[in-house]
Amino acid sequence: MYDHQLSDASLTTWLLIARTWSAMYKVEERKLAKVGLTPEQVDVLWLSRDYPIPLTPAEISRSLFRESQSIAGLLSRMEREGLVRRVPKRKGRPFTQVQLTAKGQELCPKGIETATNVVAKIMSCLSAEEHEQLQKLLRKLRQSALEELHLELLQPPSKAAG
């Protein structure tokens, strides 16, 4: 892996963020493969297990910041693998709800434990103060990107709201 230092500080920072994310994702991907899951599947399993309101593909898309068609494909693959099921629209419920299957319920804790262990190990190199600094900077960058996309940052739903 190369450590590029570009002539423009913004480009160097951008590249560093992108390559850091890619490396961290690759670690998570490799560890989860041993459990038989992908990072995206763990995200969906975790949401399906713990989401405070009925989980729909649209909510998954918003929560994971992914396009609806990529979530539809992911859910189709997860259904084929027996991890989730989509409950079709019913009278009085204008959506499809995503629910864990028995296999999804079995793999969910293993996936979450693996993912949280990866996060803990990688992030342990930062002090509490560094975590706060990095979070502040990343929130600032996220807000700038959301403004470019003309999107507003929303609060996630809570059990009280559902």
Image: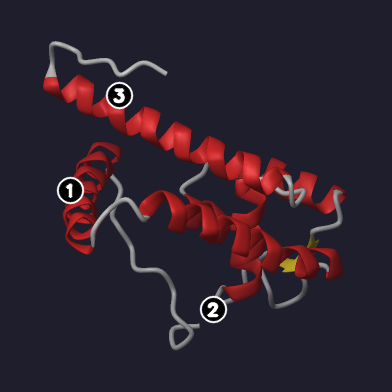
Left or right, 45 with respect to 63, comes to right
Q: What kind of residue is marked 3?
A: Leu
Q: What kind of residue is marked 1?
A: Leu
Under circle 1, the secondary element is helix
Tell me the residue that label 1 is attached to: 137
Under circle 3, the secondary element is helix
Residue 145, given in percent of the width and then of the height, sits at 26, 39
20 or 91: nearer the viewer: 20
Quarter of the figure that contains the N terminus: top left
The numbered mark, 1 or 3, whose residue comes first in the sequence reads: 3
Residue 137, given in percent of the width and then of the height, sits at 17, 48
Q: How far separated are the C-alphas under marks 1 and 3?
A: 16 Å
Q: How far separated are the C-alphas under marks 1 and 2?
A: 29 Å
The numbered mark, 3 or 2, whose residue comes first in the sequence reads: 3
Please report the residue visible at 21 percent of the width from the left and 15 percent of the height from the top: 5
Checking the image for residue 15, the label placed there is 3
- CB atoms at circles 1 and 2 under 8 Å apart? no
The answer, for residue 62, to whether it is visible in the render is: no
Residue 38, given in percent of the width and then of the height, sits at 67, 45
Under circle 2, the secondary element is loop
- Place residue 52 in its image quadrant: bottom right
Q: How far separated are the C-alphas under marks 3 and 2?
A: 36 Å
Checking the image for residue 52, the label placed there is 2
Residue 153, given in percent of the width and then of the height, sits at 30, 57
